[in-house]
Each structure stands twice: as structure tokens, then as C-alpha cells.
Image (cartoon, rainbow, N blue to C red):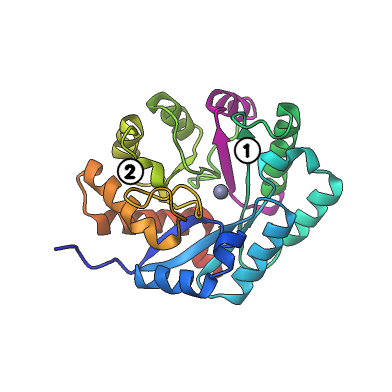
Amino acid sequence: MAEAPPAAAIDTHTHLNHPRLHRGLPQVLDRAREAGVAEMIVVGYDLPSSELAVELAARHPGLWAAVGIHPHDASHVDDKTLGRLRELAGREGVVAIGETGLDFYRDLSPRQAQMEAFESHLALAAEMSLPVIVHCRAAQEPLLDFLAARRIGPVGDLPALVWHCFDGSEEEARRALDLGMALGFGGMVTYGKAEELRRVAAQVPSGRFLLETDCPYLAPEPKRGRDNEPANVAVIGERIAQVRGESGGQVVETAAQNARRVFGLTDRA
Ligand SMILES: [Zn+2]
């Protein structure tokens, strides 16, 4: 028999601000709550989606916001954009800067522009004392080198950086953990070929992992190919629980505690 859904799941990376989910938001939130997902972070990827994230966090209990410009749009980040992000970052319910980072897979913005935008996001996060949600695709080594060169590390015992939808190697995970990062695990951990990622999930210290969906993207098996949503976060927790030899409830609970600590959720509730 399936165990009862735990009460305290937190989806630390959602795009409820994306038109594909925003359209049916009341139903999406209902299904999330039925599945035991009490809180969700709505992550911005450009200025309009960051504005909407802040608005959603103000309007719905249990929703939090992150504001930032995705590396795809890095070439559009200028002083005006950063000024607006700074204003948004000071609003009620904003718990992180992001998503920012490096995407050398699609290369939609020049790599130099991506690094400059990432640097600006890191500076803003330091100024606002907020953690950073990092997107990284096909750029694991450059990302780790970039952070190591800046001696970015844990702030006190809080991981200041969250590597969202981590899909790097065991070695890259070790380097990220050494830098004080927390690793977010999403639907990819359920995919057939993700053996190495499951080994990472099995070994990551219990204080350093988060659960996330990245909805509407990356739906977990067996829902792959459909729109993802926060209600699926328990499926990801279950798969991680199998490889860690823990119960799904335990993994969800530990991840929720980590999310509260990393994003300071209790302080703002
Ligand atoms: Zn995302």
C-alpha cells in the first residue's frame, strides 16, 4: 500500500508563472495540495515572469518567489534590468535570486554575456542576503571553475547557492558540495539512463539536497512528455528514497527542512 502523502513537501523550483501552468493555476494548486505539497517557490526567468512570481507569492499563501534572468536572456541584462530586479528582490515573499547561471547547450546568449549576467546576479544576492538558484546546462566545469575562482562558499552553515536540477557527475557533485552548494533533484532522477545521477542522490549528505519539479518541464517517469506540475514532487522523492534506503516520507521531510533553512522560509512565513 502506498504510504500517505507527507504534509510538508516543498517544491523548490516551479514555473507557475509560465503560461502553460498559469492558465490553470487554481487546479494546479489544488492538485499540489492534495498531493501534500504545501509550499512552492515560483522562479522567474525574465523580468515579466519575475514580476509575476512576486505577485503570485503575495496573492497565494504557500507560494514564494525568486527573481532573475535566465542565462538564455543574459544578453538583455543591463543596468535598468538589474535595477528592477533589485526592487523586486526587496519585496515580501522573495526568497532567492534566480534563475541565473550558464547554459552552453543552447547558447542563446553569448557565453561572455552569460558570465557577466551571472556575476551581476551573484552580487545582487550578496547585497540582498539571498541565496542564488543556479541553472547549469552543458557548463558544469566552467560553472565550478567560475565559482571556485570567486571563492563563493557557504555563508555560515547555509548553502548560499542551489544547483537546480542537478545532473552532473559524481565528481562534479563533490566539487559543488565542497563549494557549499545544495543540490536540487528533479524528474531526471527517475529517467532510465540516469544511473550516475541516482548514485549522486544516494550519497548526497542529508542536509544538502532539495526536491523540485522545474514544472512545466521535465516531468518524472511515468509522466514524461506531459506538462509537469508540483503535485509530481512526491514521485521524485520516492525514487530518491529507493536509492537512499529511506522512506519517501523521510526524504520529503528532510528536503523540506533543507528548503526552509536554505531559503529562510520560516523567517518569512
Ligand atoms: Zn527553471
**Residue tagged by mark 1?**
101
Mark 2: amino acid: Thr
Q: Which image quadrant is residue 255 in?
A: bottom left
Q: Position of residue 144 (x, y in %)?
A: 55, 27
Look at 63% across and 27% down and name the residue there.
146
Left or right: 153, with 100 as reference point:
left
Above-or-below relation of 12 to 191: below
Magenta-colored stretch includes residue 42: no
> Mark 2 or mark 1: which is in front?
2
Mark 1 is surrounded, within 10 Å at the Cα level, by few (under 14), some (14 to 19) or many (20 or more) other residues, namely: many
Q: Is residue 151 left or right of residue 219?
A: right
In which quadrant of the rendered image does the N terminus lie? bottom left
Q: Which residues are magenta?
A: 127-150
The answer to if 131 sits in the magenta stretch is yes
Residue for point 38% across, 58% down: 232
Q: Amino acid at mark 1?
A: Gly
All told, the count of numbered labels is: 2
Q: Where is residue 60 shown, x and y percent of the image?
A: 56, 75
Q: CA distance from mark 2 to mark 1?
A: 24 Å
Residue 117 found in image quarter: top right
Give the label on residue 190, or none.
2
